[in-house]
Image: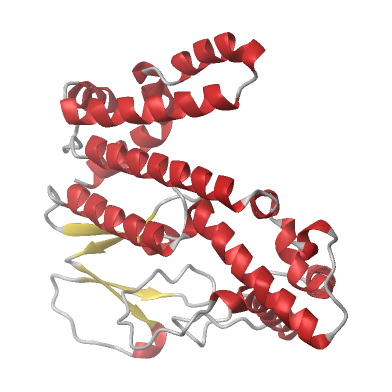
Amino acid sequence: MEFVVNGHFGTGADELLDELYSMSVRVSEVLDQLGYSESMVRYRCEATERLDRLLNRHRTDYLGITIGSKQEGYCCPFESDRDVMFIHETVVCRLQEDGTSSLPDTLTEFIMDNEYCNPGYYRLELIRKAKEEDSNLVVNIISCVKVLQQSIRDNFLPYYMIPDRNLLRGRINLTQRHHLIAKLDMLIQEGPLVIMRCPKVRLALQMPSAELIKQGRWRDKLEKLWVEMWNMWWAYCLPGIEVEEMFRQAGRSHSFINVWQEMNDLTLVRLLLTSKASASSSCSHRCKVFFDFNTLYKITDHESEKNVKHSSTLE
């Protein structure tokens, strides 16, 4: 496409509009293949809800609910951490402006500091969802950047859940403000081509559509296998259990091992196909070592041990 190869658009208004729409649609197609399709977002949301149910099944006086980008399904497994909101039956949290309330002595009450503390998240009922069109994607990106720039100029960025809270209060000084405004102005001047600053999107835009779709299917399948295996592993999480014991129990499950082997085979084939013929033998050896089941334990041990200990402590 011209905007990818030459880095500029046509000069006529109609030609510019056509190329802008064409670019938006193409970028949207690319994002679908990079793991951000509607079906993958929906799959992640459902998988996260299943994981929450698994982890909550042995809890009595509190519940843990995944929030943020993980709960919304907008990030891949290793793109962001997992934020959890714990809801305790004996704890109440309110805003300062809510005023005083009469509560029984069995409840503990907190007041939230809107300005300097993270306000937490709340479950909201969706009344109306704005219509999104693929042809408006790059236009919306620039619009968001402009809104952010104006908020920095005004030094006021309202929090969408608590409008009176200013997310910028005490966060940036005058020098930083001028620097951010200038940086954002540079991005705005780039216009729709600012999307090319994303390395994965830039490379994917230059790939043939057929190859991109093929790789996208492989990527989605691999992620689903990983998420399925991850949720199966957490099914062995019991109060006080150690990480090593969870791996031992999972290693005795035919279902868990079958998913693990399918993911292993899928990855090995991919690596071998993309390796040079002269290095295929050594690559095969490295792959087998990396995807050994014991190595999986070593890779996930650090994060999993923290989660298990945290869960056990709260139990």
Where residue 126 sits: x, y (%)? 33, 82
For image coordinates 40% across by 75% down, the residue present is 112
Where residue 69 sits: x, y (%)? 44, 61
Which of the 4 quarters of the picture holds residue 14? bottom right
Which of the 4 quarters of the picture holds residue 244? top left
Where, quadrant-wise, is the N terminus in this rendering? bottom right
Where residue 61 sits: x, y (%)? 14, 58
As drawn, 231 above or below 188: above
Q: Is residue 63 left or right of residue 125?
A: left
Total residue callouts: 0
For image coordinates 55% across by 74% down, the residue present is 134
Q: Is residue 247 left or right of residue 253?
A: right
Residue 71 seen by the camera: yes
In this view, which residue lies farthest toward the right?
11
Which of the pair 229/240 is nearer the observer? 229
Residue 301 seen by the camera: no
As drawn, 117 above or below 164: above
Where residue 310 sits: x, y (%)? 31, 42
Which of the pair 251/135 is nearer the observer? 135
For image coordinates 34% across by 19% down, the residue present is 293
For image coordinates 50% across by 87% down, the residue present is 163
Where, quadrant-wise, is the C terminus in this rendering? top left
Q: Is residue 50 left or right of residue 79?
A: left
Which of the pair 208/23 is nearer the observer? 208
Which of the pair 123/45 is nearer the observer? 45
Colouring convention used in this rendered image of the protein: secondary structure
As drawn, 281 above or below 56: above
